Amino acid sequence: MANLLILKMGHTFAEIAARWGDFDDWILACAPEFVRKKAILCVPGDPLPALGSFSAMIISGSHSMVTHPNAWEQKVMRWLPAALNTEQPTLGICYGHQLLARVLGGVVDDNPHKPEMGYQPIQFQGDYQADPLFRCYPSTIEAFTFHYQTVCTLPTSAKAYANSTREGRHAVHFKDQIWGVQYHPEFTAPIAMEYVLHEADALKKAGYNPFQLIQKAQMVRVPDPLIPQFLSLAFPS
């Protein structure tokens, strides 16, 4: 069946959800209408869907840490290998990216370069334009980041295509039709500014100036093309 599974690994802050919706809403806002109508949502605590009930999957971000999974997250980790073996198009975002790396044999841990937050310049390199997903980007983009952990060691055969000052594996083609990004292509500038305001104290402790991050977010005008590009690969017209 041509269904998109959104595996929702957590929730945004309640105040932000009340104003802007949640992780799944932001992902679906990037999708064409025919994909939205066929989306299957799986939230923390739900039974995991049967293999064969979906044809592509996006794994969302989370405020949890991959290194400290709760009972449901552990269940997802046991379920994912079989789901990934179906070779269906899969995209992991932030926590989802780290989760894919861990399940596929990589190592995830705290970022040795300290947390990365706010809109940051991300550079693509190598032959990324030959990659069916990441070729949608110019060589440098501004993308919203908000993560404490990172993929320290890539799984065998995975290839990293992008980095920033504090993150060396922002865009990874893990294998076949499985990709992950550490940044947040689903965030809009208003949502990013809400995060900055909500986490101002944490940002200051990490060495950031919240006011400067808000100013930078206000300059963002172009929607991120990654999720539409992924969906065009997963659901070709």
Image (spheres, rainbow, N blue to C red):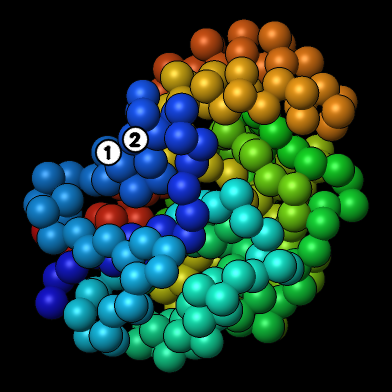
The amino acid pointed to by label 1 is: Ala
Q: Which of label 2 and label 1 is nearer to you?
A: 2
| Position of residue 94 in the picture relative to residue 32 (left or right) | right
| In this view, 79 is above or below 38 | below
Q: Residue at x 36, y 24 (%)?
A: 19
| In this view, 228 is above or below 161 | above
Q: Would residue 191 be seen by someone viewing this image from the given angle?
A: yes
Q: Residue at x 34, y 48 (%)?
A: 24
Residue for badge 1 = 29
| Residue 140, position as x, y percentages in the image | 61, 34
Residue for badge 2 = 21
Query: What quarter of the picture does the N terminus occupy?
Result: bottom left
Q: Tell whether label 1 touches label 2 (CB within 8 Å).
A: yes
| Residue 197, position as x, y percentages in the image | 61, 18
| In this view, 97 is above or below 211 | below
**Circle 1 — which element?**
helix
Q: Would residue 26 be seen by someone viewing this image from the given angle?
A: no
